[in-house]
Image (spheres, rainbow, N blue to C red):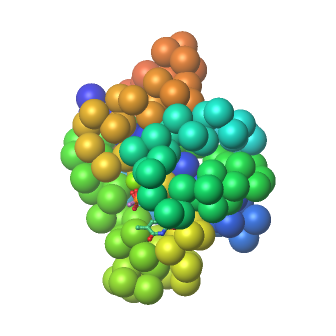
Amino acid sequence: MEKTFIMVKPDGVQRNLIGEIVQRFENKGYTLAAGKLMNISKELAEEHYGEHKDKPFFGELVSFITSGPVFAMVWEGEGVIATARKMMGATNPQDAEPGTIRGDFGVQVGMNVIHGSDSPESAEREIGLFFNEDDLVSYEKTISKWV
Ligand code: ABT
Ligand code: MG
Protein backbone atom coordinates (compact mmCIF):
# COMPACT_ATOMS: atom_id res chain seq x y z
CA MET A 1 0.00 0.00 0.00
CA GLU A 2 1.20 3.54 -0.81
CA LYS A 3 2.93 5.38 2.06
CA THR A 4 4.03 8.96 2.61
CA PHE A 5 6.07 10.89 5.14
CA ILE A 6 4.18 13.66 6.95
CA MET A 7 5.66 15.91 9.63
CA VAL A 8 4.12 18.52 11.90
CA LYS A 9 6.82 21.20 11.92
CA PRO A 10 8.05 23.02 15.09
CA ASP A 11 5.49 25.83 14.63
CA GLY A 12 2.65 23.29 14.38
CA VAL A 13 3.81 21.50 17.54
CA GLN A 14 4.10 24.79 19.45
CA ARG A 15 0.62 25.80 18.31
CA ASN A 16 -0.95 22.52 19.51
CA LEU A 17 -1.85 21.38 16.00
CA ILE A 18 -0.67 17.75 16.25
CA GLY A 19 -4.13 16.50 17.17
CA GLU A 20 -5.90 18.58 14.52
CA ILE A 21 -3.56 17.35 11.78
CA VAL A 22 -3.73 13.69 12.82
CA GLN A 23 -7.52 14.05 12.94
CA ARG A 24 -7.69 15.34 9.37
CA PHE A 25 -5.79 12.35 8.01
CA GLU A 26 -7.86 9.93 10.10
CA ASN A 27 -11.09 11.59 9.00
CA LYS A 28 -10.04 11.42 5.38
CA GLY A 29 -9.69 7.63 5.67
CA TYR A 30 -5.92 7.15 5.81
CA THR A 31 -4.12 4.85 8.21
CA LEU A 32 -1.31 5.85 10.57
CA ALA A 33 1.64 3.46 10.18
CA ALA A 34 4.17 5.22 12.47
CA GLY A 35 4.53 8.39 14.51
CA LYS A 36 7.06 9.95 16.87
CA LEU A 37 7.81 13.23 18.59
CA MET A 38 11.49 14.06 18.08
CA ASN A 39 14.13 16.74 17.75
CA ILE A 40 15.80 16.89 14.34
CA SER A 41 19.60 17.09 14.36
CA LYS A 42 21.35 19.59 12.10
CA GLU A 43 22.74 16.65 10.09
CA LEU A 44 19.30 15.12 9.53
CA ALA A 45 17.85 18.55 8.63
CA GLU A 46 20.57 19.16 6.03
CA GLU A 47 20.02 15.71 4.55
CA HIS A 48 16.22 15.98 4.54
CA TYR A 49 16.32 19.39 2.81
CA GLY A 50 19.37 18.49 0.65
CA GLU A 51 17.57 19.55 -2.57
CA HIS A 52 17.48 23.14 -1.25
CA LYS A 53 21.12 23.40 -0.12
CA ASP A 54 22.01 26.07 -2.69
CA LYS A 55 18.89 28.19 -2.07
CA PRO A 56 19.18 31.51 -0.21
CA PHE A 57 16.72 30.33 2.46
CA PHE A 58 18.57 27.07 3.27
CA GLY A 59 20.20 28.33 6.49
CA GLU A 60 16.92 29.66 7.86
CA LEU A 61 15.13 26.49 6.84
CA VAL A 62 17.59 24.27 8.74
CA SER A 63 17.54 26.50 11.82
CA PHE A 64 13.71 26.59 11.81
CA ILE A 65 13.24 22.83 11.46
CA THR A 66 15.74 22.17 14.27
CA SER A 67 14.29 24.89 16.54
CA GLY A 68 11.93 22.61 18.45
CA PRO A 69 10.34 19.17 18.37
CA VAL A 70 8.51 17.89 15.29
CA PHE A 71 5.94 15.11 15.05
CA ALA A 72 7.07 12.73 12.29
CA MET A 73 4.59 10.27 10.81
CA VAL A 74 4.05 7.70 8.10
CA TRP A 75 0.55 7.60 6.62
CA GLU A 76 -0.73 4.86 4.37
CA GLY A 77 -3.55 4.53 1.83
CA GLU A 78 -4.62 4.81 -1.77
CA GLY A 79 -3.17 7.92 -3.42
CA VAL A 80 -1.90 9.21 -0.06
CA ILE A 81 1.21 10.98 -1.44
CA ALA A 82 -0.62 13.35 -3.81
CA THR A 83 -3.78 13.63 -1.72
CA ALA A 84 -1.83 14.61 1.41
CA ARG A 85 -0.23 17.44 -0.61
CA LYS A 86 -3.72 18.64 -1.58
CA MET A 87 -4.84 18.46 2.06
CA MET A 88 -1.76 20.53 3.06
CA GLY A 89 -2.29 23.28 0.45
CA ALA A 90 0.27 25.48 -1.30
CA THR A 91 3.79 25.90 0.13
CA ASN A 92 3.12 29.58 0.83
CA PRO A 93 0.22 29.60 3.32
CA GLN A 94 -0.96 32.91 1.86
CA ASP A 95 -1.59 31.10 -1.44
CA ALA A 96 -3.10 28.03 0.21
CA GLU A 97 -6.87 27.66 -0.12
CA PRO A 98 -9.03 27.89 3.00
CA GLY A 99 -9.90 24.36 4.02
CA THR A 100 -6.33 23.15 3.54
CA ILE A 101 -4.04 22.78 6.55
CA ARG A 102 -1.71 25.64 5.53
CA GLY A 103 -4.67 27.71 4.33
CA ASP A 104 -6.38 27.36 7.69
CA PHE A 105 -3.38 27.64 10.03
CA GLY A 106 -0.40 29.36 8.38
CA VAL A 107 0.78 32.79 7.31
CA GLN A 108 4.51 32.61 6.53
CA VAL A 109 6.25 30.49 3.87
CA GLY A 110 9.17 29.80 6.21
CA MET A 111 6.80 28.48 8.93
CA ASN A 112 4.19 26.50 7.07
CA VAL A 113 3.04 24.06 9.76
CA ILE A 114 3.41 20.75 7.94
CA HIS A 115 5.66 18.80 5.59
CA GLY A 116 4.57 16.06 3.20
CA SER A 117 6.59 14.11 0.63
CA ASP A 118 6.16 15.49 -2.88
CA SER A 119 6.64 12.26 -4.91
CA PRO A 120 6.96 8.47 -4.50
CA GLU A 121 10.77 8.85 -4.61
CA SER A 122 10.74 11.52 -1.86
CA ALA A 123 8.36 9.44 0.23
CA GLU A 124 10.65 6.42 0.15
CA ARG A 125 13.74 8.53 0.87
CA GLU A 126 12.15 10.52 3.71
CA ILE A 127 10.51 7.52 5.42
CA GLY A 128 13.97 5.88 5.37
CA LEU A 129 15.60 8.98 6.86
CA PHE A 130 13.21 9.19 9.81
CA PHE A 131 12.11 5.62 10.49
CA ASN A 132 13.48 2.09 10.65
CA GLU A 133 11.66 -0.66 8.81
CA ASP A 134 10.42 -2.18 12.09
CA ASP A 135 8.92 1.15 13.26
CA LEU A 136 6.21 0.75 10.62
CA VAL A 137 3.10 -1.03 11.87
CA SER A 138 1.02 -2.89 9.31
CA TYR A 139 -2.58 -3.65 10.23
CA GLU A 140 -6.03 -3.83 8.79
CA LYS A 141 -8.74 -1.44 9.95
CA THR A 142 -12.08 -3.18 10.08
CA ILE A 143 -13.66 0.07 8.87
CA SER A 144 -11.52 0.14 5.72
CA LYS A 145 -14.13 -1.55 3.52
CA TRP A 146 -16.38 1.49 4.11
CA VAL A 147 -14.02 4.22 2.83
P1 ABT B 1 8.21 21.24 2.65
O1 ABT B 1 7.10 20.38 3.07
O2 ABT B 1 8.81 21.96 3.81
O3 ABT B 1 9.22 20.53 1.80
O4 ABT B 1 7.50 22.34 1.76
P2 ABT B 1 7.04 22.21 0.24
O5 ABT B 1 7.44 20.91 -0.33
O6 ABT B 1 5.61 22.59 0.15
O7 ABT B 1 7.86 23.37 -0.42
P3 ABT B 1 9.39 23.43 -0.74
B1 ABT B 1 9.62 24.16 -2.12
O8 ABT B 1 9.98 22.06 -0.69
O9 ABT B 1 9.96 24.34 0.38
C1 ABT B 1 10.82 23.81 1.38
C2 ABT B 1 10.84 24.75 2.55
O10 ABT B 1 11.44 25.94 2.18
C3 ABT B 1 10.66 27.03 2.64
N1 ABT B 1 10.76 28.10 1.67
C4 ABT B 1 10.49 27.86 0.37
C5 ABT B 1 11.15 29.36 2.11
O11 ABT B 1 11.39 29.55 3.30
N2 ABT B 1 11.23 30.35 1.21
C6 ABT B 1 10.94 30.16 -0.12
O12 ABT B 1 11.04 31.10 -0.90
C7 ABT B 1 10.55 28.84 -0.55
C8 ABT B 1 10.23 28.55 -1.99
C9 ABT B 1 9.26 26.50 2.76
C10 ABT B 1 9.48 25.08 3.12
N3 ABT B 1 9.52 24.89 4.54
N4 ABT B 1 9.39 25.30 5.58
N5 ABT B 1 9.36 25.41 6.71
MG1 MG C 1 9.29 20.00 -0.19
Of 145 and 4, nearer the camera is 4
Q: Residue furthest top?
A: 134
Q: Quadrant of the N terminus?
A: top left
Residue occupying image coordinates x 48% and y 55%: 115
Q: Give the quarter of the image for residue 140.
A: top left
Name the foreground residue: 119 vs 21. 119
Instruction: Tell me the quadrant of ligand 1.
Output: bottom left
Question: Picture coordinates of residue 105 (x, y %)?
Answer: 55, 78
In the visual, does 147 lie left or right of 84?
A: left
Question: How many marks do you count on the picture?
Answer: 0
Dividing the picture into quadrants, the one containing residue 67 is bottom right
Residue at figure coordinates x 35%, y 29% from the top left:
124
Horizontal side of residue 24 vs 83, given as left or right: right
Please tell me which residue lies in front, 137 or 91. 91
Residue at the spot x=50%, y=63% of the render? Answer: 56
Residue 42 image offset from top left, x and y in percent: 69, 39
- Locate residue 79, reporting x and y percent: 22, 46
Q: In this view, does 145 lie above or below 139?
A: below
| 6 relative to 111, above or below | above
Q: Is residue 23 visible?
A: no
Horizontal arrangement in the rendering, residue 74 relative to residue 1 (left or right): right
- Estimate the x, y position of residue 142 in percent, counting from the top left: 38, 35
* Residue 82 visible within the image: yes
When the figure is inspected, residue 112 is found, relative to residue 126, above or below; the finding is below
**Residue depicted at x 45% and y 58%:** 55
